[in-house]
Amino acid sequence: MEILVIGSINIDYVSTVEKLPKKGETLHANSFEDSAGGKGANQAVGARRLGANVSMIGAVGKDAIGGRLKDSLAREGIDVSRINTVDVPTGNAIITVDKNGDNTIVVYSGANFEIDNKWIEDSEELIKKSDIVVLQLEIPMDAVVYSAKVAKKYNKRVILNPAPAKELPQEIYQYIDYITPNETELQELTSIENIELGVKELLGRGAKNVIVTLGEKGCYYLGEEGTHVVDSFKINAVDTTAAGDSFNGALAVALCQNKDIKDALRYANAVGALTATKKGAQTSLPYGKEVEKFIIMK
Ligand code: RIB
């Protein structure tokens, strides 16, 4: 089970607040911490903790934080040989989390935006040996499209988590096996409010399977294995940061295990739910044993 994540690595600066700030408002935080994040790195760590062999292509800055984040990925057992160190600050995210576990996130891309096609080309060996390639949108769009294209050249399955949502070039859809927007991202991508119609639009553009994550309502799937609505697991959300990331990491793992889509989505829902029960991004990502126990108890 070889998963390759091509994506972002950030340091998250997280303040917890009673309620999210309004425009122009200054609030006192109840607590503050910094911790490892970035959608790409979260998905990589998520998949690794569920038992997959994971490699990552990414970038950090030549600063102390960059070294710390790369070391922490290596300690997780992730192959970091294609995480380059560049002369641009490491990416960061300013996150506020309210008492319901909802958040706002502002990302500074920094080193993540130094990834280019040459870098991907030089990392083709990693793509060749992977079973699934997982992508998000926190690195340059050209690199995302090129990565997906190379992955398809080697007949690899491609998951694109279109977050944060950006317009996608038409070319990329032909390379996508699974696209996994949340409701807001789906609307951004298609300008269509109705979920079913939005999903059909993405299929019409060429994606093979569409999965819309619906938070506490679970997820909706339409694609090669029919239509499925898969319920969420009921939990008390503490912090939803990285719940979408862990969903994607878990989906990659479940697909590598050849689970059918319904089982894969139930598993990914469980992992996403468990993630929301703890604070932080990588600090909240569950291990395989915890997930098994959680599913049995529900
Ligand atoms: O999805 C959560 C992640 O988004 C955070 O870890 C932050 O770094 C941003 O990339």
Image (tube, rainbow, N blue to C red):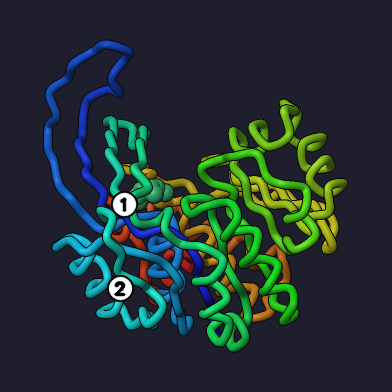
Image x and y of residue 96, in percent = 27, 34
Up/down of 262 relative to 163, above or below: below
Rendering quarter of residue 196: top right
Q: Secondary structure at mark 2?
A: helix
Q: Earlier in the sequence, mark 2 or mark 1?
A: 2
Q: Nearer the viewer, residue 65 or 122?
A: 122
Q: Nearer the viewer, residue 175 or 197?
A: 175
Does residue 289 lie above or below 233 as drawn?
below
State the residue position of label 2.
73
Figure disc tally: 2
* Rendered position, 13 above or below 154: above
Q: Residues within 10 Å of mark 2 (few under 14, many from 20)?
A: many
Q: Amino acid at mark 1?
A: Gly
Question: At 68% across and 37% down in the image, what residue appears?
Answer: 189
Which of the two residues, 169 or 117, is positioned nearer the viewer here? 117
State left or right for residue 11 relative to residue 201.
left
Q: Give the residue drawn at x 13%, y 41%.
A: 32
